[in-house]
Amino acid sequence: MGRPYRFWDSRLQASRFGTVLAVSLFMLALSLRAQFTATIEGRVSDQSDAAVPGAEVRVENVATGIVRSMKTSGEGYYRVTALPPGAFTLRVTAQGFDTLIQENIALQGDQTKTVNLQLKIGTSSTQVNVSAEVPLVETGEARISGYVQEKQVSELPLTGRNFMTLSY
């Protein structure tokens, strides 16, 4: 005669399956979120190209007003990760230097933008606004990406509306 059926065995198996499923879905959600966030990085230096350690770098999302702050490293480097796509303003302050503001930094999903900043010696009460656009060429990483708008997809020349014909 076989092993008698036990209710708790099936509940234990279902519980294990549920736990594995929940952990898998959580890890999938984390990996998907990471694909759609951007990064701003760079180096803060003075006019002689010497590093400015301990400078405060503030990154403000223009649309939401949310601000992320950090200090530069001993070599003057900074890196702000997990930023949503959008327009940003960088504000850099350091003792003995003029405040520098870099506006209109556009980030797309899964992009790393390098913005190197050069501070001028002065007082921290003086403010320098830089409104020039950052170049469109990305030198930080060797990859190409972009967004496809709904209109672009609907205007694709597809034979019989079959997306598989795009690979040929």
Image (cartoon, helix red, strand yellow):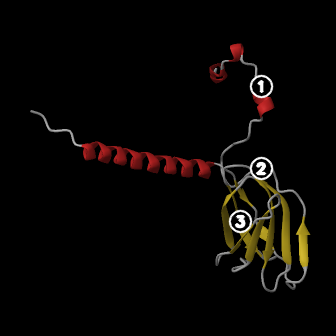
Viewer-nearest of labels 2 and 1?
1
Q: Is residue 75 above or below residue 4?
A: below
**Identity of the amino acid at label 1?**
Ser
Q: Earlier in the sequence, mark 1 or mark 3?
A: 3
Residue occupying image coordinates x 50% and y 50%: 27
Q: CA distance from mark 2 to mark 1?
A: 28 Å
Q: Nearer the viewer, residue 33 or 168?
A: 33
Q: Residue at x 74, y 72 (%)?
A: 57
69 sits left or right of 128 in the view? left
Question: Marks 1 and 3, Cα distance to the nearest angstrom?
Answer: 39 Å
Which class describes the residues within 10 Å of circle 3: few (<14), some (14-19), or many (20+)? some
Q: Quadrant of residue 147?
A: top right
Secondary structure of the residue carrying numbered label 2: loop
- Vertical side of 141 occupied by 6: above or below: above
Q: Which mark is residue 137?
A: 2
Read off the residue under disc 3: 42
**In the image, what residue occupies the spot 87% across and 56% down?**
133
* Mark 2 neighbour density, 10 Å: few (under 14) some (14–19) many (20 or more): few
In the displayed structure, does residue 80 sit left or right of residue 30? right
Question: Mark 2 or mark 1: which comes first in sequence?
Answer: 2
Where residue 161 appears, as percent x and y from the top left, is: 70, 17
Expressed as whole percent of the image width and height from the top left, the position of residue 135 reads: 82, 53
Q: Amino acid at mark 3?
A: Gly
Q: Is residue 14 left or right of residue 60?
A: left
| Element type where label 3 sits in the image | strand
* Residue 114, quarter of picture: bottom right
